[in-house]
Amino acid sequence: MNVSRRDFSVLLAAAAGLCATGLAVAQDWPERPLKMVVPYSPGGPTDAVARIVATKMAATLGQPIVVDNRAGAGGTIGVDAVAKSPADGYTLALVAPGPLAGMPNLMKTPYTTGDLTYLTLAARIPSVMVVSRKSGITTLKQLVEKAKKTPDALNYSSAGAGTSPHIGFELFKRETGTRITHVAYKGAAPAVLAVLSGEVDAAMLDLLPILPHVASGELVALAVAGPGRAPQLPEVPTTVELGWKNVLMETTYGIVGPKDLPPAVQQRLRESAIAAIEAPDTRAQFLKQGAIAATSSSAEYQRLMQVESEKWRGVIASAKISIN
């Protein structure tokens, strides 16, 4: 295609205009408060992490960030609200893997993961296998041996069908060849209480809700379901150390927005989020919440959710998990 000198000049002017517009967006944005959706109820670990990050990001961006709790349908209601928001950078979500990697394998979600922009990881909370002190079990090997000696006699609690405590324990059962009965509760708090009271024998739960009970001696932490020990429980071995290298389950929190965010806005969001997460006082606050600060590139975060989705899909199929 031949382009005249005049046409070429017009193209250069148009390109310069677009660059100027992008710079203006980067300089002027944000001009009003932002919203960070938490697709779960207030008071939980996702909410706690979101409020820490939102406060730090707001200080960097110069605008308040309002935390908006939109619970329901395993986190899919809140994520759908973000996916359908204008792509202007004013609406974000801090999410756990459930609505990105889990629920799409259990139900038809009103969005696809392609409807989102993955910004960065924020934190990770390892899952921990626990039993009541009253059980007399002190090691993961003892739990496995007891379960194999009396198939279907033991049971475990979860925060509900299809949640990470459910998927994680079914993964443990598959890898250890044990038969332990699932009892679903409505949330992590009642799932913990069930172990404490002796209603169930065991659970694989996020570190945050079990941490005070392990500290008090009411619960025994048998193993951390991850490749590395939790800094809050340095004496507790990992499933990998104990010989079950595939029993890996942790809750990874990250920040997403709607697709097609302007590149300049996306960059500012990422920079402010990473600065907030990597700040020393944020790391210290996360540790108190049972979390470990973690950041990533957009591509790394998206790839991690794809890997998690494949893992969840396999466990859901092998354990015949349904939310109907």
Image (cartoon, grey):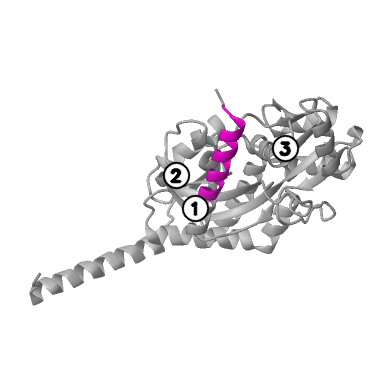
Residue 98 in percent (x, y) is at 57, 39
Q: Which residue is mark 2?
A: 113
Residue 276 in percent (x, y) is at 60, 59
Q: Earlier in the sequence, mark 3 or mark 1?
A: 3
User: CA separation, marks 2 and 1?
Assistant: 9 Å
**Secondary structure beneath disc 2?**
helix
Residue 303 in percent (x, y) is at 50, 54
| Residue 275 appears anywhere in the view | yes
| Residue 38 appears anywhere in the view | no
Q: As drawn, is 13 to the left or to the right of 65?
A: left
User: CA separation, marks 3 and 2?
Assistant: 33 Å
Q: Main secondary structure of the magenta part?
A: helix
User: CA separation, marks 3 and 1?
Assistant: 32 Å
Say whether marks 2 and 1 touch (CB < 8 Å).
yes
Q: Nearer the viewer, residue 118 or 146?
A: 146
Q: Which residue is mark 3?
A: 177
Q: Quadrant of residue 9?
A: bottom left
Q: Nearer the viewer, residue 315 or 2?
A: 315
Looking at the rendered structure, the kind of residue marked 3 is: Gly
* Label 2 Cα neighbours within 10 Å, binned few <14 / some 14-19 / many ≥20: some
Q: Which residue is mark 1?
A: 302
Q: As drawn, is 9 to the left or to the right of 238?
A: left
Residue located 30% across and 63% down the image = 21
Q: Quadrant of the N terminus?
A: bottom left
Q: Quadrant of the C terminus?
A: top right
**Secondary structure beneath disc 1?**
helix
Say whether residue 318 is magenta: yes
Q: Which residues are magenta?
A: 305-322
Looking at the rendered structure, the kind of residue marked 2 is: Thr
